[in-house]
Image (tube, grey):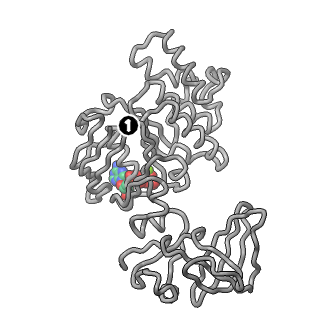
Amino acid sequence: MIRFEDVEVVFGDHKAVSNLNLEIQEGEFFTLLGPSGCGKTTALRSLAGFIEPTAGRIHIGGRDVTRVPSEKRDVGMVFQNYALFPSMNVRDNIAFGLSVKKVSKAEQRKRVDEIAERTGLAASQLDKNVSELSGGQQQRVAIARALVLTPRILLLDEPLSNLDAKLRVQLREQLKQLQHEVGVTTVYVTHDQEEALTLSDRIAVLDAGRLQQVGTPEEIYDRSATAFVCRFIGESNRLTPGILSRLSGTGLDATAESYVRPEKLQLAGADDPSPAAAGLTGTVVERTYHGSHSVYEIAVDDATLRVSVPASASARRWDAGETVQIGVDPAWVLQYPAA
Ligand SMILES: Nc1ncnc2c1ncn2[C@@H]1O[C@H](COP(=O)(O)OP(=O)(O)OP(=O)(O)O)[C@@H](O)[C@H]1O
Ligand SMILES: [Mg+2]
């Protein structure tokens, strides 16, 4: 459906995107994820047709659109700052693209009413000025304005990042449901890993303009392809040489850069049967309660490991100073060639 082929974007002497190769399937919710400045917006804007790549090709639906102007690519775009027309009411904002296309007034009305309902905008809001709406409502208007034109592709650049945390989660769920209903191929840009994990069918992780990994959220999180991806996504414990030497005989490479995520470790009391094939013994330094889970900091030799334990009716708890066993399943240890 969408293909980036060796796409490169250079600004002056800075390579914002290097040799990007990606394939995005029809109907997919695809996310570009990475830290600030890694080239996410640049990649998205080249797909939208706002930036011409310095090298490489971009295809949409089998057609080479590399030199095709934005308005002929059939893409809808939603920006972080909404970019609505402040002097127009909600209805006119949503209908803007339709009126440019000379769609009849009656048809405009019908389509705006339909899309407003789908995007969760009440009929009473349509006659308001956009400046009277909250941030969340304004972003719904921006999404409605893009979708009313039934684009082949919906592009969203950090659409939720200006909203407060609670609204962000709420709108995130609605956006996912909307995308599911409408079925439009969606390319989403964010630097928020949780947003990427919860929304996406697949994620591409970028670092300094270079693609690090493409995969499902589970693949990205559980099977991070590079140490960068492992450190960027979620939390992880770096295993020191001392800890690795204690895990000898498990098939792990003691010279590799090694990580394990806090919830992949198992805790047990000092006298309990060993919780996993390989184990470490340590002392609880601190326990932090998070409601749904607790995080233990455990001193093992010269290292401190974080272990996350889900809350449950039967979950045992350990206090600072207690000796515990940490079960390590080598299958969950992520290893990378030493830098
Ligand atoms: N028009 C431009 N002219 C010069 N340099 C630019 C331009 N646009 C982006 N850059 C540079 O290219 C790099 C990638 O920028 P880009 O906006 O794509 O990053 P991003 O991943 O979207 O970051 P953020 O999360 O902060 O939005 C940055 O170093 C940026 O400074
Ligand atoms: Mg950006």
Which quarter of the figure has residue 61? top left
Q: Is residue 230 above or below residue 77?
A: below
Residue drawn where x is 48% and y is 54% of the image: 217
* Quadrant into which the C terminus falls: bottom left
Which quarter of the figure has residue 136? top right
Q: Is residue 105 above or below residue 291?
A: above
Q: Nearer the viewer, residue 330 or 91?
A: 330
* Quadrant into which the N terminus falls: top left
Count the marks: 1
Residue drawn where x is 45% and y is 59% of the image: 220
Would residue 179 appear left or right of 39 to someone viewing this image? right
Residue 156 percent coordinates (x, y) = 46, 41
Residue 73 percent coordinates (x, y) = 32, 31
Q: Residues within 10 Å of mark 1 (few under 14, many from 20)?
A: some
Residue drawn where x is 43% and y is 39% of the image: 186
Q: Looking at numbered disc 1 in the image, what kind of residue is underneath it?
A: Glu
Is ligand 1 within 8 Å of the beta carbon of the residue shown at mark 1?
no
Q: Is residue 147 above or below residue 270?
A: above
Which residue is identified by label 1?
Answer: 26
Residue 24 percent coordinates (x, y) = 36, 43
Q: Secondary structure at mark 1?
A: loop
Residue drawn where x is 47% and y is 87% of the image: 248
Q: Nearer the viewer, residue 283 or 111?
A: 283
Residue 35 percent coordinates (x, y) = 45, 59
